[in-house]
Image (cartoon, rainbow, N blue to C red):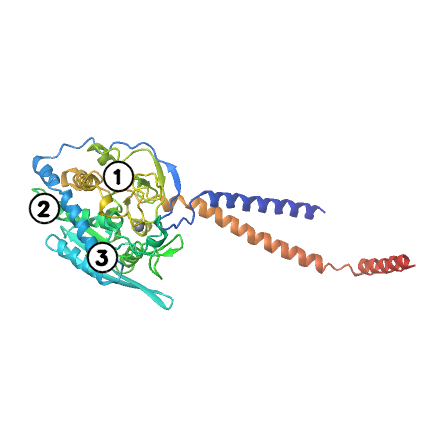
Amino acid sequence: MQIWKNWKILKILLIWINLCSFIQVTSSNFGNIFKDETFTPLSSISPAISSVNSFDTLNEHDLQLINSYNSSEVLDFIAQQINFGPRIPDTDESRLCQNWIVSKLETAANVSLHPFSIKKGANSCSGTNIVAKINEGHEKIAIFAAHYDSRAVAEKDPNEWLRSQPIDGANDGASGVAVLLELSQIVSQIVSQSKNKWNYEFWFIFFDAEDQGYSLGFNGLPNFEWCEGSTYMAEEMSQKPENYFSQNQSIDSIKSFILLDMVGGENLEFIQESHACPDLQEHLFNVGNHIGYGITFPLDRNSYSIIDDHVPFAQIGVPTVDLIIKFWDLSNGWPYHHTQGDNITHISLESLEITGKTILYFIFFTFHPSRDIFPNGFSSPTYFQQNWPTIIIFSVGIISVVIYGIITLISRKKLKFRPFPKVTQENNQNKLQNKQKSKE
Ligand SMILES: [Zn+2]
């Protein structure tokens, strides 16, 4: 009787542990591998500490270089990409765009193509990433990235008939590429004309196949998930570092990774993203505020979780930031995500200017030889570390389910084979007698 009571208590305890772990797991972001579309409001970030105010003002020459950033040329770069047609991976239009990107980079950078093909059962998906390196010969690396593919469907278009058609991707794809092309030209001038030796390599990366995953009943392309190009590159960097790094470099050499995705739409307002490295993100938003772009880089707001090309790099410990808008919110001022409205008429020169200039100031305020404010680099992303308590509680839940199952099985078997033959026989005889009595 005593054992039976204890067993009941143990059962209740196990159910309670399971209930707790279920609540914890469902309320946290565990397993939050969402596609491009999905978001989860996570936490409110603390007001940013000022990482910029302590800097000297830039000299005349630095300012001249920053002011040479030409947003009209950036807009033209967007138009040229759209003119190639939809940049759907592994198509002639995509290859035309690829060649054009390389031709724009070649004078300023050392450019390499990284084709990939990923087996998916009997099928495969393939594409080509582009890497351009400026100021080679240093251990530390600062990366700026964007995706150059455009989505093959417009699943969010208000007109049902247009949903299976590819989009221009003027903002979603082309804007990030265009800003990076302009920046690469200026960065090469910054490092070559400076009296001080800049001790960072600047890499400009153009990912293929970011935007072909599944959403609202539509696959961009069959066999494609979101972020195929960046996922492949992050894995290859881990497994075959010699394909990317010089001998004195490794993944740890990447001190900063800034992703530009949808940076040219009207009413530009970037979000805080939860896979990002908090101090790098805070610093970049501080720079935006410092130069007067507080509306685009709002401080102290909710943080959202977005799956984008920075995530595979955050997962291998690289400090990342994703400059991206609240694209799922139709009241955000740019309601054209994955619709035919993502065209050049909804691109803003001002937004292109704000993004490009903020990145240039960020480069001066962060990597300049006399202003290297984070000499030990930024901290690792906390997103994946934060999940450890959840993972532990989840594991405890699973283990308790298994224990519950085993104990139940054992106790049932014991009851079944309980050796009380005499009692059983007596009971049976009594039962038989009772039955006979009732028949009579
Ligand atoms: Zn997209």
Kindly identify the amino acid type of the residue bearing the numbered disc 2: Gln
Where does the image place residue 295, in percent across and percent down from the top left? 26, 33
Q: Residues within 10 Å of mark 2 (few under 14, many from 20)?
A: some
Residue located beneath label 2 in the image:
189
CB-based contact (under 8 Å), mark 3 and mark 1: no
Classify 325 as above or below 427: above
Q: Identify the mark at residue 231; answer none if there is no mark.
A: none
x%, y% of residue 137? 14, 52
The residue that mark 1 highlights is 268
Residue 124, compared with residue 55, is above or below; it is below
Image quadrant where residue 409 sits: bottom right
For marks 3 and 1, give the CA distance: 25 Å
Pointers 1 and 2 in contact (CB under 8 A)?
no
Q: Is residue 202 visible?
A: no
Q: Residue 203 vs residue 306: left or right?
A: left
How far apart marks 1 and 2 lie (CA) works out to 28 Å
Q: 96 above or below 176?
A: below
Residue 421 picture location, percent across and down: 79, 61
Residue bearing mark 3: 85
Instruction: Name which residue type carries label 3.
Output: Gly
Q: Judge the density around disc 3: few (<14), some (14-19), many (≥20) Cα neighbours within 10 Å.
A: some
* Mark 1 residue element: loop
Q: Nearer the viewer, mark 2 or mark 3?
A: 3
Horizontal arrangement in the rendering, residue 225 relative to residue 129 (left or right): right
In front: label 1 or label 2: 1
Task: Please tell me how many numbered marks the rendered image carries.
Answer: 3
Q: Is residue 191 left or right of residue 267?
A: left
Of the residues under marks 3 and 1, which one precedes in the sequence?
A: 3
Quarter of the picture containing the C terminus is bottom right
In front here: 202 or 354?
A: 354
**Residue at x-position 63% and y-position 54%:** 408
Q: CA distance from mark 2 to mark 3?
A: 32 Å
